[in-house]
Image: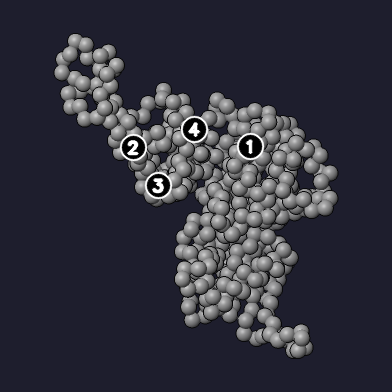
Amino acid sequence: MRLLRIKDNSPQKKDAFSQIKKLTGKIADKTLEQLEREGVFVFPETIKNAEDITEDQMILQSVNDSYRSGNVMGFLGYGDERLIIESRFGGDEEDYFFQYLLDRVLDFPNIVDLESDANQDNRLFNFLLFLFPYYLKTAMRKSLFKKYIRRRYNDGNAKGTIDIARHIEKNTPFVGNVAYSQREFSYDNSLMELVRHTIEFIKRKPYGNNLLVKVKDEVKLVIDATPGYELYDRQKIIEQNKKNAIRHAYFREYFALQKLCLLILQHQKHQIGSGSRQIYGILFDGAWLWEEYINLLTEDTFYHPMNKGGKSAQRLFDGNIGLIYPDFISRNSEVRIIADAKYKPIDNIGNRDYLQVLAYMFRFDAKIGYYLYPKEEGFDDLKLWMNRGSTYEANVMPRDDISITKHGLKIPVDAPDYAGFVAKMKIFEQEFTSVFSV
């Protein structure tokens, strides 16, 4: 196996990728959305109208004689070639920051050392298992999935289409029963059966019950809704779901859950990415993880519209025109603040980022803006005052009432272990949020 480890948001000479040349050719200059269509599991699922699905979300972007990684972390494979993308704050052996983001946002178990397992495919499989509670909870916020199915009966209360061949087979000589079938709107359908099979599969893992206790109410609902579950039906249920993917936009959360369940249940027989020519892996959108993490820290101070979830959309203009999703809008309407989470280095925040936040500030009558980004220790905040005047009149000068601040959260890079990293993060989080409570 040929393995290469790189950092997110970092340049790397193309020569370094010579050992994984085939894999690099499959992923270079492609967006998350493109890779997702090719079979790579992307978390969270990409949405076409999301603002962040641009070149920033590329795995590797060609820049002269180098490749620049984007805002993604995770694992990719192709044949016997492997690529691990860690956070840029990770150490030589452990990536505590990536682990911490997964722990805070997704309540992940402590398994982020991607290279500690001799079998990388098993490591990838564990990631898929640990994502199941999140996807199950998200899908079932829309209640149990219900659809029409065709059931077959043989009794004296014929209500649907009579099955002549089956009737002759089962009811000769005639004793009063009729073989028939009818369409029914039911919770016990192929998708819910697939979810049930996944639950039963996870239960048999050593950590299965601890994993499922996070969604015990949802698990109970699924079990109660699938009285027709039989273990020996698993392959039939898998084939039914492979042929009948959930396509309706309203149920996109169930489509994501269906895709995850199929990957989990097919792992034992086929392995993930079976076939020497198939690309496979799991990638985490670091920008999304960072934004959700910041929301956990500041939810008492800011509203948090969510573009990927399509929640709390705002509009620039009257007539429902100009859809926008500012990352954070302060709850204090007297001194309105607009904040934008950026999972990238301070020097990469500029140009389009400035225009975007200034437009949001203008829309919400805010005179204070923030970029919230992760930084190494030792870097100070940078406050930018907006200019007034024009170079044509030679009267350009900074205003004293409108500013945007690049406000970083310190990330420890020298912690001796994960417990030490968490302890330092708690201190830095308090420092980070204190500026909003003044």
* x and y percentages locating residue 260 in the rendered image: 51, 39
Residue at 57% x, 27% y: name it: 270
Q: Three-letter amino acid code at disc 2?
A: Tyr
Q: Three-letter amino acid code at disc 1?
A: Tyr
Pointer 3 or 4: first along the chain: 3
Q: Please identify the residue farthest to the top as the structure is shown.
A: 173
* x and y percentages locating residue 141 in the rendered image: 39, 50
* x and y percentages locating residue 85 in the rendered image: 69, 46
- Between residue 227 and residue 377, name the one nearer to us: 227
Residue at 38% x, 49% y: name it: 142
Q: On screen, 342 above or below 128?
A: below
Calculate the distance from the C-alpha at mark 2 to the C-alpha at mark 3: 18 Å
Question: What residue did someone put label 3 on?
Answer: 140
Pointer 1 or 3: first along the chain: 3
Question: What residue did someone put label 1 on?
Answer: 280
- Between marks 3 and 4 in the image, the one whose residue lies nearer the viewer: 4
